[in-house]
Image: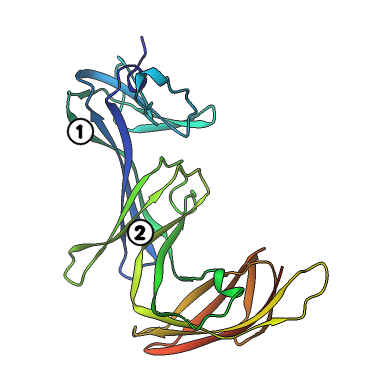
Amino acid sequence: QTVELGYLTGGLSWKADYVAELNSDETQLDLTGWITLNNQSGTSYNNAKLQLVAGDVNQVQPRLLGRSVPQFEMMSKSMVAEDSSVVEESLFEYHLYSLNRQTTLENKQIKQVSLLSANAVPVTKQFLLRGNDYYYNSSYGELGQKMKIAVYVEFDNSEKAHLGMPLPKGIIRVYKNDSKGNAQFVGEDNIDHTPKNEDISLKLGDAFDITADKKQTDFKKVRHYKPHNVAYESAYEINLKNAKSEAVTVTVREPVPGEWKVLKENHPHTKTAAGTAEWQVTIPAESKTTLNYRVLVQY
């Protein structure tokens, strides 16, 4: 008999937790994942076979019960275990994770079981300065001093990258060894349910040694032509500073409203989406680089 514990009894839940360790030059990471089981149901489960369904399952919530249905379903049934691994398979539009060993889960107990282990996963690091769209249709002066540059690490959930397993949503905590070999926490981020062959991008924090000063250097209303009702021309200066002992490349991402065109720039931009311009700006070690651009926006 199969008992759907997560739905019928309540108080029994699970989540995925991950730990990643970056190598010394931050080009690879080792990733370990666990399933954390939490039994607050008031009942103990002895020698149970657990199957865990991950996905965004639509469920009707009875109004009179006054409680929400758990996002993850947990099922338990008696079965002789053959090994201690976790087997993943597709189930409708979700993914099923089966623990191939019996486990006992006492009432009010939290237990972890291994989900995955992957070594030498290639990663890239990105420095990102993200702008706003409000200053393209009005006059402003200074837009920010010592602005924070966000730091991301990105990797591919593929077999080629030593992964390739559908990953349940959870928190990935990232560490890196210091000069004495001690693991130091460098940031964490949530991931959603991630299919095989999808990219994963983790925001770990803001760079200490890279900052930006940004200002609008010109703004004027210009002549417009039908079908547009109004047109603005504005110019910007972004001073990117790098105190590191090596060169870095910063992605400047600007959400530009309306119908727009870059009229002048000292670094080439890429139109990455209908309303997004991006510049890749390299800053030498212990130096600074200035990005200047002028843009026409029409509504």
Residue highlighted by disc 1? 110
Is 109 or 160 nearer to us in this picture?
Answer: 109
Using the image, determine if residue 166 lies above or below residue 160. above
Q: Badge 2 local density, few (<14 within 10 Å), some, or many (20+)?
A: many
Closer to the camera: disc 1 or disc 2? Answer: 1
Residue 142: image location, x then y, percent: 46, 83
Residue 244: image location, x then y, percent: 34, 83
Q: Residue at x 51, y 71 (%)?
A: 131
Distance of label 1 from label 2 (alpha carbons): 27 Å
Q: Residue at x 35, y 59 (%)?
A: 29
Examine the image and state in which quarter residue 34 appears.
top left
Examine the image and state in which quarter residue 293 appears.
bottom right
Q: Quadrant of the C terminus?
A: bottom right
Dot 1 or dot 2, earlier in sequence: 2
Residue 123: image location, x then y, percent: 43, 62
Examine the image and state in which quarter residue 73 appears.
top left
Q: Quadrant of the N terminus?
A: top left
Q: Residue at x 63, y 72 (%)?
A: 270
Is 99 or 210 nearer to us in this picture?
Answer: 210
Residue highlighted by disc 2? 29
Q: Is residue 174 left or right of residue 240?
A: left
Using the image, determine if residue 276 lies above or below residue 55. below
The three-letter code of the residue at mark 1 reads Ile
The secondary element bearing badge 1 is classed as: strand
The three-letter code of the residue at mark 2 reads Leu
The secondary element bearing badge 2 is classed as: strand
Using the image, determine if residue 166 lies above or below residue 261. above
